[in-house]
Amino acid sequence: MFRLSRHRRERLILSIVGLVLGFIWFFPILWMFFSSLQPNSELLVYPPKIIPRKVTLENFKTILFSGRGVNVGRSFLISVFLASIVTIGVLVTATPAAYAFARLEFKGRDILFWLIVATLILPVQMFIVPVYLLLDRLRLLNTFWAIILPPIGPAFGVFLLRQFMLTIPDELEDAAKIDGCSPLRFLVQVVVPLMRPALVSLAILTFLGVWNDLLWPMLVITDSKLMPLQPALARIRGEYHGTFEAGTIMAGAFIAAIPVLIIFAFASRYIVRAISTSGISR
Amino acid sequence: MGATKKKRRDLTALFFLLPYMVFFVVFILIPLIHGLILSFQEWSLLSDPIFVGLDNYIELLGVRRFKAAVQNTLMFALQSVPLLLVVPLLLALLLNKTFVGQKLAQNAIISPFLIPSSSVLLLWIWMLDSQTGMINQAFKALGLPGQAWLSRQGSAMGVIVFVTLWWTAGFNIILYLSSLQDLPQEFYEAAAVDGANRWQQFWYITLPLLRNRMLFITTLQVIGSFKLFDQVYILTGGGPAGSTRTLAFYLYETGFRDFMFGRAAAVSWYMFLMIALFGILQARFLNRWLGEGV
């Protein structure tokens, strides 16, 4: 009989264990997908069919366009829009601030930086009541501003970008100074291109953060016409009849997961890098 | 350096900092201070705020729901923190090996943590449905009785812990993998020369070197426990019989269902105090107990 060497046999076992575990772990997501493709009545059958017998896109049509209570299609577009705007806002404000903390000399720089970063460990619950009242005072509740503006405050982006900027060699800056390059030009023309991986990481994490947020949009947007995707989905549970429309609900859940899975498929290394270098997120 | 040059330098820094600092001050600093002031006020939608000193804090100590929420939050932390420390470590140790399909397995296990809570939780409501859910169907096939997982007092919190573990393990796996990849190979080579077996290598080399990472994950998970909201809001609504009402959920009910803003702010400062207390305890005892950091 053909005998594997000890080393190869070990690898084979690792492969089997790893892939079986991976399949079990991912199975609920596959199940969400398969459920969404079946007519609701099929899902009540025992024993359950893991591979769909009848495949239909009816559930996606219902959830996206018929809109009982909330219009998931519109909410999807609203979330894409809001997450994009916040991402731009964070990049535009955090980049120069991180540059100042990493590269410029000024009085109290390090104290200010660590004070700002220390606020990152505070739970979001400490801010929701006062920020809600502030937005109420500014008459910004039930407007997109209520979702766009507050997430630019947390120091995560400044922290992440500063850590990356510290790794850029000083010599580069000295050379630029001798050439008479202003700090702003140096930032835009030298630092930003070098920082592209860090900026992409930050952009992805910011986008996903806004995309995935449930509590805050739920509090500040009560008008169903303006509602982002997560609070809209939280609501469909009450609008559709649980068990009897499970396929339709799963179509809604899957629609919210699609962009995230796509981003992960193409950019997992940026996400992994951002998390492992900063260690802080969410 | 001359005074003018210094001044110019500070002005340049200000120019770079200002856009961000405006947002920091308006949405972090001022709300933090305002939240503290609010916690000393009695304020609902019906009346103007009145200064009441420590009343909110003292009254809360007598509110049964608040005490239960503290207890439930601690229960969640006690169950979820060890699980989220150990299970991701085991998975990371596996994924740190080289084998065919490693990348596929890694992506399959990590990716759930990025999926939005409402998707994940609607999915688990469906999986755990007492009649037609996948889990009970599987139980039935094995001849075991199905359970009303989310509506029984004994199991609802367990389900929340389980779903949280499944959902967020990937994040900690990433943290572990990045540490594992940084471990100095020479240590293992030297240990192998000395005849240390794999278990000894893990126990005497890997684990001590991962200590800081584990402390960091513990801190993140404890803070995360205090933030636990989405799972409660979508899966159980705090029930059954208040057995899954966490602090974060109680705060939400107090502030945005009962509109008692002052009291809700006081709850958030209790949260802060508990996290700070944990930080102090960790610095004092946990670090010492685990030995000095590397």
Image (tube, coloured by chain):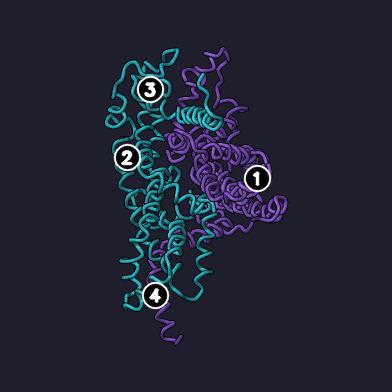
Q: Are marks 3 and 4 on the same chain?
A: yes
Q: Residues within 10 Å of mark 1 (few under 14, many from 20)?
A: few
Q: Nearer the viewer, residue B263 or A272?
A: A272
Q: Which residue is mark 2?
A: A75
Is A232 situated left or right of B213 in this image?
Answer: left
Q: Are marks 3 and 1 on the same chain?
A: no
Q: Nearer the viewer, residue B172 or A137?
A: B172
Residue A31 found in image quarter? top left
Q: Residues within 10 Å of mark 4 (few under 14, many from 20)?
A: few
Q: Which residue is mark 4?
A: A174
Give the colour chain A carries in the figure: cyan
Is disc 2 in contact with disc 4, using a CB cutoff of under 8 Å?
no
Secondary element under disc 4, as helix, strand or loop, is helix
Mark pair 3, 2: CA separation: 20 Å
Residue B59: x and y in percent read 65, 49
Secondary element under disc 2, as helix, strand or loop, is helix
Q: Which residue is mark 3?
A: A245
- Chain painted in purple in the figure: B
Mark pair 3, 1: CA separation: 62 Å
Is A67 situated left or right of B113 in this image?
Answer: left
Disc nearest the viewer among 1 and 4: 1
Q: Which residue is mark 1?
A: B193
User: The disc labelled 4 sits on which kind of residue?
Assistant: Asp
Secondary element under disc 1, as helix, strand or loop, is helix
Which chain is mark 2 on?
A
Residue B71: x and y in percent read 65, 40
Give the mark, 3 or 2, whose residue is nearer the N terminus: 2
* Residue B267 appearing in the image: no
